[in-house]
Amino acid sequence: MKLKYLSLNDRLYRYVCACRSHADDPILQALRRETETLGDISRMQISREQGDFMTLLVAAIEAKTAIEVGTFTGYSAICIARGLPARGRLICLDVNAQWTAIARKYWARARVQNKIELRLGAAISTLKKLERNLTLDFAFIDAAKEEYDAYYELILPRVRRNGLILFDNMLWGGRLSEGRIKQAGGRAIDKLNRKLARDKRVESVLLPVADGIQLCRKL
């Protein structure tokens, strides 16, 4: 059978972005514009449809407690927090005070700041120091690619049954199918993709959204 997929172009992608419930959200649009002033690093921002997808997932599983590894300027945190109930809790981990200062400003504008707790510091050591009895319903991982597997192994035991873990950048810019991978980050992503496909602790699917999303459900 012929492989069934679409190659996007700019016009079709703009159509996809326009056909979203939150396509005209002024706060998210303003945050994207401010993030773009940071220059090339702004490419770390998640895509619009990816953010909406996460809001939908968090709400659909009725998540109450979530964690995010890699917050940047706070776009994804707003999307996750909006899916949480009024007393929901999102723990955000990042190392950069400058980027997260932008995040704090927009969390307040979006009125989700009371749901979010920012913890600055190295992600692995911060994850090791999480409260002993903390149970997670949802996790989003989007930080140092070489450390993804370490984040996963530290987070998975805390995720409740049927909870979700979502990884970003799992197609590595489309370069994973081009033969030998030279970059350490790309090798780590490829190794983790293959591990997740075989991991009996989770059910996973690799989706061609933005730069690739791995969505895992804990069994």
Image: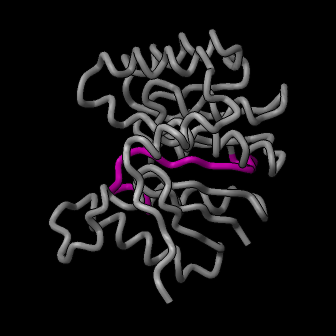
Residue farthest to the front, as pictured: 11
Would residue 116 be found to the left or right of residue 6 on screen?
A: right
Q: Is residue 161 above or below residue 106?
A: below
Q: Quadrant of residue 33?
A: top left
Q: Which residues lie in the magenta part? A: 132-149
Number of numbered tags placed on the structure image: 0
Where is residue 101? Give x, y as percent. 45, 14
Identify the residue shown where x is 50% and y is 90%.
Answer: 1
Residue farthest to the bottom, as pictured: 1
Q: Is residue 75 above or below residue 209?
A: above
In the image shown, does 45 or 12 lie closer to the viewer?
A: 12
Would residue 190 be found to the left or right of residue 24 on screen?
A: left
Where is residue 199? Give x, y as percent. 57, 79
Q: Residue 3 lies in magenta, yes or no?
A: no
In the image shown, does 51 or 101 lie closer to the viewer?
A: 51
Identify the residue shown where x is 22% and y is 61%.
Answer: 184
Q: Is residue 83 above or below residue 194?
A: above
Identify the residue shown where x is 28% and y is 73%.
Answer: 177
Q: Quadrant of the C terminus?
A: bottom right
Q: Residue 138 lies in magenta, yes or no?
A: yes
Where is residue 183? Give x, y as percent. 18, 61
Where is residue 166? Give x, y as percent. 57, 54
In the image shown, does 175 or 3 lie closer to the viewer?
A: 3
Colour scheme: one colour
Identify the residue shown where x is 34% and y is 21%.
Answer: 36
